[in-house]
Image (tube, helix red, strand yellow):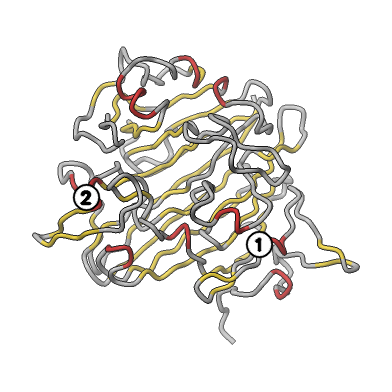
Amino acid sequence: MKKQVLLFSCLAVCLAVASCTGKKNGEPVLTRSGLNPQNYVTEVDGKQSALFTITNSRGMEVCMTSYGARIVSILVPDRKGEMQNVSFSLGNVKGYFPGGGADSFGASVGRYANRIGKASFQIDGTDYKLSVNDNGNTLHGGVKGWLAKVYDAEQLNDSTIAFSIVSPDGDQGFPGTVTAKVTYQLNADNAIDINYEAITDKKTVINMTNHAYFNLSGNPLVPILNHRLYINADSFTPTDDQLIPTGEIRPVEGTPMDFTVEKPIGQDISSDYEPIQFAGGYDHNWVLNTKGDDTMLAARLCSEESGITLEVYTNEPGIQIYTGNFLDGKVISKDGVPYQHRTGVCLETQHFPDSPNHPEWPSVILEPGQTYHSHCVYRFGVK
């Protein structure tokens, strides 16, 4: 019998490497990060979600749900060797449903990550109108992007899981039937290696990313303003007051956007610099100097409290840094802690926002016969 995608609840998974641990002596078996797998079983559009876990030989644990192919928790050691959860984690899959303020948390975002201005673009003279969900624009794939859908899941071994999805022609207004896959592999060097692939039967646009919120202190009550950040980028793409790129590529030198020398995130976040004022902090795309070389460091984040570091590598031309400017305490963690303003930071590897309307920028066009490939590595360490 051919290996089929896992559409079962946690109680039905019987592989030796299965992440869903079910019950023991009638009681639910929690993940090391304290998640109850049963709380991640639900049905969306006739498909059942589940919780999965990957581990490595050094004791690191990453939990994910097939709802949105999203990261739910990441356990890594701090400088004392104590394990800390460094990502935002909710205790129930329904907390990630649209409308609750956490729909993007940890998600594999598609068909198009970030914003498309005026919810429209053109391919070969044909206009495409998209679903509107952000002040007249399209954000993260529209009203019901891939982050709000259950992916098929296949756990390949104890350190690797693959999620796949088929998006029909016209989904949220996008052309072409797209088959996409995102594979998470947890390596022995404490790196989460993420590979995205997609094919289409009609010319379309695609831009996938992961939207995990990180707080490397391990304490979501601690703002990320003291986290130190380095970005290997000499320029960025400024936006208007709707956070849509203007089309300009502007040097960071001499501006609060300059992270070419590591500095605390909070050092210039209250600047009167217009791009920062528009976003209420950092929510911008940096143009990476790496030129698609995923062996070169794209960004580095470090918590002085825990000593935990995060290095980012990617073949993408850009990275969006978002400092949790819209967090307001309404979303509650699995431990009952409200996620407040600027207590998490996202590092989203990507093509530039609104690229379908800027043909002069790196192309996001995918044609039949081509395979889209995006690669991101989140490598954790200590200092």
Work out which quarter of the rendered image holds the N terminus and state it: bottom right
Image coordinates of residue 257 in percent, x first then y, are 36, 21
Name the N-terminal-most of marks 1 and 2: 1
The residue drawn where x is 30% and y is 29% is: 236
Image coordinates of residue 211 in percent, x first then y, are 48, 45
Q: Nearer the viewer, residue 343 or 123?
A: 343
Task: Determine contact: label 1, label 2, CB under 8 Å.
Answer: no
Q: Nearer the viewer, residue 41 or 156?
A: 41
Image coordinates of residue 143 in percent, x first then y, are 38, 57
Q: Residue furthest left?
A: 125
Q: Which residue is mark 1?
A: 40
Q: Nearer the viewer, mark 1 or mark 2?
A: 1
Q: Nearer the viewer, residue 311 or 41?
A: 41
Q: Would residue 15 appear left or right of 167 to someone viewing this image?
A: right
Q: Residue furthest top?
A: 254
Q: Nearer the viewer, residue 358 or 27?
A: 27
Element assignment for label 2:
helix
Tell me the crowding category of disc 2: few under 14, some 14 to 19, or many 20 or more residues within 10 angstroms, Cα based. many
Name the image quarter holding residue 2.
bottom right
What's under tag 1, amino acid-wise? Tyr
The residue drawn where x is 47% and y is 31% is: 325
Q: Residue furthest right?
A: 25
The residue drawn where x is 25% and y is 44% is: 354
Tell me the crowding category of disc 1: few under 14, some 14 to 19, or many 20 or more residues within 10 angstroms, Cα based. many
345 lies above or below 23: above
Q: Which residue is mark 2?
A: 356
State the CA–CA distance, disc 1 to disc 2: 35 Å
Image coordinates of residue 215 in percent, x first then y, are 60, 33
